[in-house]
Image (tube, rainbow, N blue to C red):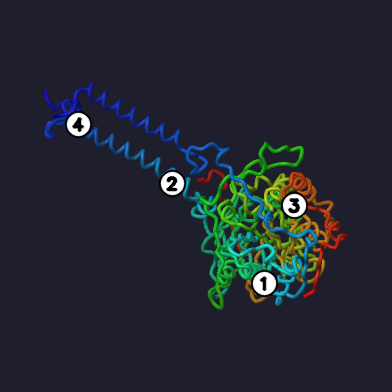
Amino acid sequence: MPTFFARRYARRPDAIGRTEKVLSLVILVVVAGLVAAIVLHLTWTWGRAPIPCAEIYQQSMPQPFPASGLADWAAPERVESFAPDELYQKINGRADLYLQHGVKALWFGTYTCPVNGPRTVDVYWYEMDTPANAARIYEAERAPDAPTVGIGDAGYQVGGAVFFRQGANYVQVIPGSLDGADAQVALTIARQLAGVMSSTALPTTQPLQDRIP
Amino acid sequence: MAGRLTRRDVLRRGAGAVFATGCAALGGYLLHDPHGRRGLGTRAQSVRRLPNYFADVGFPGQNPRMSMAMGDVQRMEQVVRAAIGGLDPDKGMRRFIRRGDVVLIKPNVGFDRPPALGATTHPEVLRWVIRLCREAGTRRILVTDHPIESPAACFARTGISRVVEEEGAEILLPAQRHFAEVGVRDCEPDRGLGEVLHHWPMLHAPLAEATKVIGVAPVKDHNLASASMNLKNWYGLLGERRSRFHQAIHETISDLALLMSPTLVVADATRVMMRNGPTGGRLSDISPGGVLGRPTVVASVDPVACDAWCYENLLGRDPDRLAYLGLARDKIRARVVEGEARFGESDWRAYDARGLVTMVNV
C-alpha cells in the first residue's frame, strides 16, 4: 500500500511537468555543490598546507634572476619571494635584523649545475628601502678581513661565497660547496646579478600587496 | 490539471529546499572544529602533557653532570664516545638508553644550508649519537625537526637525511597530523615572572612515542637570543606561527626549558658560528670549537648548565648576561623543589667546584 508521501506525491514520470524537472535538477545540483564545497574546504584545511604566498607570487612575476653566464649552470627554475612579514620563513630569527634595516623583499633562487654534482649556488637578493640601509646591513654582516671584489657598489668574497651591495640591494651568493671549488662560479653569477640591477627595473615594480593568500 | 506545477507548489517546494540546505550548512558550520581533528572535546581535554624523559635514568649523584671532548672532525666517533662516556665511564650511553627504548633525537635542521656553515647539527655528530643509541639496544630511533622551510630540503641539504638513512634510523618529517596542543603550565602565564606559554601546538607525535629524548644542537650566535644552543633547540618543536615569540624570546626559551626535560643533551661545537647567527653564510663566521679553537662535543644531563658553559667557553661571552639562563634556572628549580627529578643549574662553576665537570682531549 503506498505510504503517505507516495500517495500524496507519486506521479507517473510523464505526468511531471518540464518546469518541475528543470527546477528539481537545479536544486539538486546546488545542494550537491554546497556539500562538495564544504567537504573540500574541510579537507583542504585539515590535510594540506595552503600554497605559500611565495609560490603564488612567483607564478605572476617575471624572472628576476639572469642567466648564469656559464655553460652547464642554469638559472633558478623556481624563485621564492618573501614580504617583510614572511621573511622569518626563510631566515628565521635573522629576519628581525633585516626588518630593522628596512627590508622590502627577499628574492631567493638556486643556480644549478648537473656536471660533477649536482652543484648549487644559492642567491639571497634582499631589496632594502634605501641604499643607505643596504649599506648598513652589508656592513653589519661584513667579514672584517675578507678580500674585496669589484662587484656592485661594494663586495667581498669569503669561503667561495660572494656578498655585495648595489643601490638599495644587498645580495648573498653562496655556493653549496664551500671548499672554494665553485668560488669562480659564484663570482660570475654575482657579476650577472649586478649587471641586471644596473640595467633593468627592480622587482619593486611588482606589487607585494593584495596577493592571493 | 494533473502534472501541472502551480506557483504555490514551486514556492512551497523551493522554500523547503532552501530550508533544508540552510540547516545542512548551519550544521556543518557548528560541527566544524577549526582546531583540527579533535572531535567535540574541549580544549582542556585535548591538551597533552610531556613526560620527564630523564626521570627513570637513575643518574648517580656523584657522576659528572657535563663532559667535554675535543678532537679532530676525522675522529668524530672517538670524540662523541668520549663526551657521552665521560658522564658514566662504566656504562656510557647505556646509562641513558635501555634495551627496548624508543629514542627521539632532535637535531637542529632549521636551515636549508650545507653543514660547513654551522647553522645546523653536524651530520657526523648525529651519526655517532645514533650509533651509540643502537649499541645500547634501542628498539627504534626517530629523528625529527620542524624547520620553517621545506623540511625535506633542509634534511637533505644539511646531510642529516643521508646519515639517518645510513644508520638505519627513521626521519619523521612533520605533517599537520603530528601536531597537538601541549601544556606548559596549568595556569595562565604570568608575564611578570617571565612566563609566556600556557599551551601551544607542538610536534607531539614523536614525543608521545618516545621513551627517551636526546637533543643534539649546534652552538651558534643568534641575533635575537644572543645564542642558539641546547635550550633554543626545542624551539624547533613549536607549531603554528612561532615567530610571534621573537619579541619574548628569552621568556619563551626558558618556558621550553621548563617543558622539556630530556634524557641527555649533546652540544655540537665542531664548528661554532661566532657571528651573524642563526643563518650565517660565511665561512669566516665559523670557528672550529669556537674560542677553544678545537672541535668540541659537550654531553650533559643539565641543559641549562651546558648552555652556560658553551656560552662562556665556546662563544666567549658572559653567561650572567644571557637572560634565558636565569629564567630557566628559576622555573626548573620550582619543579625540583616539588620533587621532580631533573637538573637546571645556570652556574656551571658550581658543578666544576664539586668535580662534576670532565674534559678530555681525544
Assign the N terminus of chain B to one quadrant of the image.
top left
What amino acid is at disc 2? Answer: Thr
Measure the C-alpha gap from mark 4 to mark 3: 71 Å
Q: Position of residue A112 (x, y in %)?
A: 55, 69
Sequence order check: which comes first, mark 4 or mark 1? 4
Chain under numbered label 4: A
Sequence order check: which comes first, mark 2 or mark 4? 4
Sequence order check: which comes first, mark 1 or mark 2? 2
Numbered tag placed on residue A43 in the rendering: 2
Measure the C-alpha gap from mark 2 to mark 3: 38 Å
Q: Which residue is mark 1?
A: A178
Chain under numbered label 1: A
B22 and B72: which one is in front? B72
Q: Is residue A191 visible?
A: no
What amino acid is at disc 3? Answer: Ala
Q: Residues within 10 Å of mark 1 (few under 14, many from 20)?
A: many
Q: Which residue is mark 3?
A: B225
Asked if residue A93 is positioned above or below residue A70 in the image, the reply reads above
A131 and B233: which one is in front? B233
Q: Are marks 2 and 4 in contact (CB under 8 Å)?
A: no
Measure the C-alpha gap from mark 1 to mark 3: 27 Å
Same subunit, labels 4 and 3: the answer reads: no
Q: Which residue is mark 4?
A: A19
Residue placed farthest to the top in the image?
B8
Asked if residue A148 is positioned above or below residue A56 in the image, the reply reads below
- For the image, the number of numbered tags is 4
